[in-house]
Amino acid sequence: EVQVVESGGGLVKPGGSLRLSCAASGFTFSSYSMNWVRQAPGKGLEWVSSISSASSYLYYAGSVKGRFTISRDNAKNSVYLQMNSLRAEDTAVYYCAGDPTGEYYFDYWGQGTLVTVSS
Amino acid sequence: QSVLTQPPSVSAAPGQKVTISCSGSSSNIGNNHVSWYQQFPGTVPKLVIYENNKRPSGIPDRFSGSKSGTSATLGITGLQTGDEADYYCVTWDRSLSAGVFGGGTKLTVL
């Protein structure tokens, strides 16, 4: 059974930091590109970042470039998102999503973790 | 606003067919595959079409996808009330070196 579980969300003040984690099982994690996708309350989906299977390629949305860092540990079947200099507009549910081919489609999704940036 | 343009809403009667468009440019849809997601309120998005026109296992053949030039289309036939959801397109944008979602389309089955 495929499982994708995000953790690490919570309430943080503007300018603060959080590290999100995503633990996967039930599929060949090391062959998947992994992505973070977020959804602000009442808004649409927004792609945030991706990391290729061997961590060779890292990409970021313009809105988070320079503030967020994606990484992965294939030995632990996990992907991470370090979020620094957080802003109110980063408030969203953050989903971890797996892409089997690098063609930017996401067949496995976690349940999401809520990040709230507020003073 | 989104790089990919979708209509905010579409509607049709049960049993009818509806199409949802996703318009982009040569830097995204024109040169990359498109996938589509269905999302019910408060739930996780679900892949319904990948690589422009392929259906994942378990997705009924009432759902179809196509791409022409810089636009993609999701089609749903034999509409059911259970199809009421938000639908999103997504692809890669070579100019931005980033993934891009459409703004989403709310489907109402009247």
Image (cartoon, coloured by chain):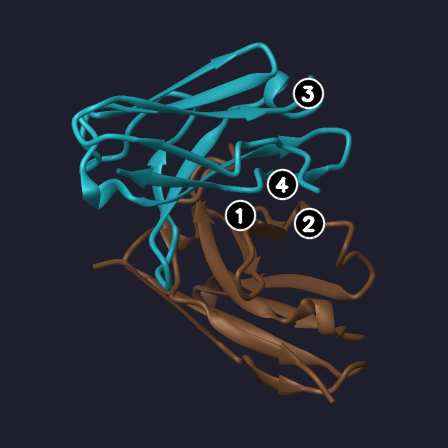
Crowding around mark 1 (Cα neighbors within 10 Å: few <14, some 14 to 19, many 20+) is many
Chain identifier, colour brown = A
Q: Nearer the viewer, mark 3 or mark 1?
A: 3
Crowding around mark 4 (Cα neighbors within 10 Å: few <14, some 14 to 19, many 20+) is many
Q: Nearer the viewer, mark 4 or mark 2?
A: 4
Kind of residue at badge 1: Ser
Q: Is disc 4 placed on a helix, strand or loop? A: strand
In space, the residues marked 2 and 3 are separated at their CA atoms by: 23 Å
Kind of residue at badge 2: Leu
Are discs 4 and 2 located on one and the same chain?
Answer: no
Looking at the figure, which quarter contains the C terminus of chain B? Answer: top left
Chain identifier, colour cyan = B
In space, the residues marked 4 and 2 are separated at their CA atoms by: 12 Å
Relative image position of residue A69 (x, y in whole percent): 71, 64
Crowding around mark 3 (Cα neighbors within 10 Å: few <14, some 14 to 19, many 20+) is some
In space, the residues marked 3 and 1 are separated at their CA atoms by: 28 Å
Q: Residue at left 66%, top 46%?
A: A56
Rendering quarter of residue B47: top left
Q: Can you identify the residue that label 4 sits on?
A: B99
Q: Earlier in the sequence, mark 3 or mark 4?
A: 3
Relative image position of residue B34 (x, y in whole percent): 49, 27
